[in-house]
Image (spheres, rainbow, N blue to C red):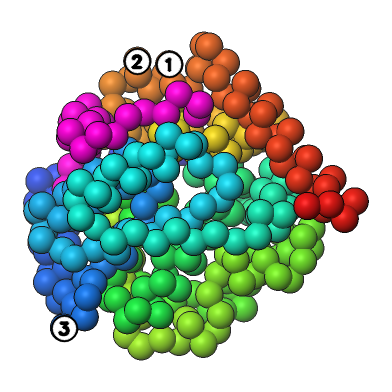
Amino acid sequence: MCSICREFVRRDTTPARAAQLADALQQVIAANRSDGRRYDAVVAFSGGKDSTFLLKVLQEKFRLNLLAVTFDNGFLSRAAFENMRKVVAALHVDHVIVKYRQDRLNEIFLASALARVYPDYLAKFGSGVCISCIRMVMTAALRTAIARQISMVILGNSPGQVLRSEKELIYRDNTIPFAMRRQLFAKLAERTGSWIYDHVMLRRDEYQTRPFPYIVSPLPILGYDEAEIYRSIMGLGWRRPADVDPNSTNCRLNAFGIIRHKNLYGFHPYDYEMSQMVRLGSLPRDVAAERLADPEGAAIDVATDVERELMCGSCCRRAGGA
């Protein structure tokens, strides 16, 4: 039995543990509702299926006043933006889009794809491209919450995206020493510049905010049924983009990360997540296997276009162009 299977066996999936987690979720939401302020929570909203479903559940089940925050990495599908427009209109949710300089984002994504810039233990959880992008999503969401004195940042993580333990479902992200956190991004900074730290992590004074916002991932606690998620969000006008790989419902960059990760490590960056989802009963095995196999080669096609855009942007910058 491999190490990943042994790790899964150790997970407590009993009804009693599920009830404890549900109670913990109820308690953290009840304790952190806004006190006279406009928003109860920031939701990291990518326009993908999971974050769309999350918005709907948080509003309908928990009656939260939400601020949707989208990090625009420059490679979100146009259809994803159309989905966002329809969803926030249908749910009457305020929406903020965070956008950084594209030339610097391109630099980060290329550096993250072409070398092993993160510790190997993170490689099973996703490509370097996605790790960098997700850290920028988290930073943008936390920075927005701190600036607006919002007590919760809520993520649309699936059960297969919980990295090591259930402690990552409800936690505060300011417990890691600042120097240790910077060290995680040191190799990336060597290949780009020290400016990347402001993109992928908060400043020291921001981490010292009291009280610091909770980060909450409710979907693994509430239950996750992909077929039901699709049925629910299509009622809001959401439609799956046609220009993404089988493992994404919003982002073209994901395909580039997949291909480069397979080149660097020799395995698919979604192997771990898909296997966890199958073992939890959240996804049929044949669906997961086909998604990873990608028989039509969609990831390669999309990745080729994205790499061309990334390289062109990098060349234009070196040449002093736009």
Kind of residue sitting beneath label 2? Asp
Q: Horizontally, is 196 left or right of 133 in the view?
A: right
Q: Nearer the viewer, residue 170 or 247?
A: 247
Q: Position of residue 182 (x, y in %)?
A: 63, 72
Q: Tell me the residue at 42%/55% (across/down).
A: 70
Query: Who's the residue at 39% across and 62% down the image?
Result: 96
| Residue picked out by circle 3 | 36
Q: Residue at x 39, y 79 (%)?
A: 146
Image quadrant where residue 241 sits: top left
Amino acid of disc 3:
Gly
Instruction: Kindly state the secondary structure of the residue where label 2 is placed.
Output: helix
Judging depth in this view, the residue of 183 and 227 nearest the camera is 227
For marks 1 and 2, give the CA distance. 6 Å
Of residue 75 and residue 166, the one placed in the foreground of this image is 75
* Range of residues picked out in magenta: 221-245
Residue 78 percent coordinates (x, y): 48, 37
Q: Is residue 264 above or below residue 146?
A: above
